[in-house]
Amino acid sequence: MAYYDATNGDLRYARCGSGCVTNALNWTLRTVDSVNAVGTYASLAREPLGGVAFAAYNSTTGDLRWARLDTAAACAP
């Protein structure tokens, strides 16, 4: 899941290995982009080989930002 961290103004990514409904500790959180206030209107797309692509609005500059995590980074704890 991609989301905007309003406290820090960052685009964040959350993924769960398994058992997320019963154990919140199974979630892995990471910052994808932290330049200015970026992350509003976040979207996420899974790539065929397992990577993850993100698009989000940078409200400081008015730009659309794009980021990508390769398969290893997207799946790392």
Image (spheres, rainbow, N blue to C red):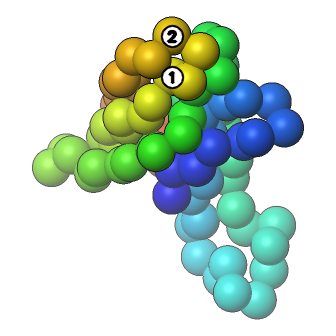
State the separation of the CA atoms marked 1 and 2. Answer: 6 Å
User: Quarter of the image holding residue 15?
Assistant: bottom right
| SS class, disc 2 | loop
Residue that appears at 73% across and 67% down? 26
Q: Secondary structure at mark 1?
A: strand
Position of 46 with respect to 72 (left or right) is left
Which disc number belongs to residue 61? 2
Figure check: 25 above or below 50: below
Residue 37: x, y in percent? 65, 22
Residue at the image point whose x is 38% and y is 48% from the top:
43
Q: Which residue is mark 1?
A: 58
Note whether residue 68 is visible. yes
8 to the left or right of 44: right
Query: In the depicted view, which residue is nearer to us: 72 or 5?
Result: 5
**Residue neighbourhood size for the residue with mark 1, other residues' Cα within 10 Å, grouped as few (<14), some (14–19), many (≥20):** many
Q: Position of residue 27 (x, y in %)?
A: 70, 62
Q: Of the residues shown, which amino acid type is indicated by label 1?
A: Asn
Q: Is residue 13 visible?
A: no
Q: Disc 1 vs disc 2: Cβ atoms closer than 8 Å?
A: yes
Q: What is the number of callouts on the image?
A: 2
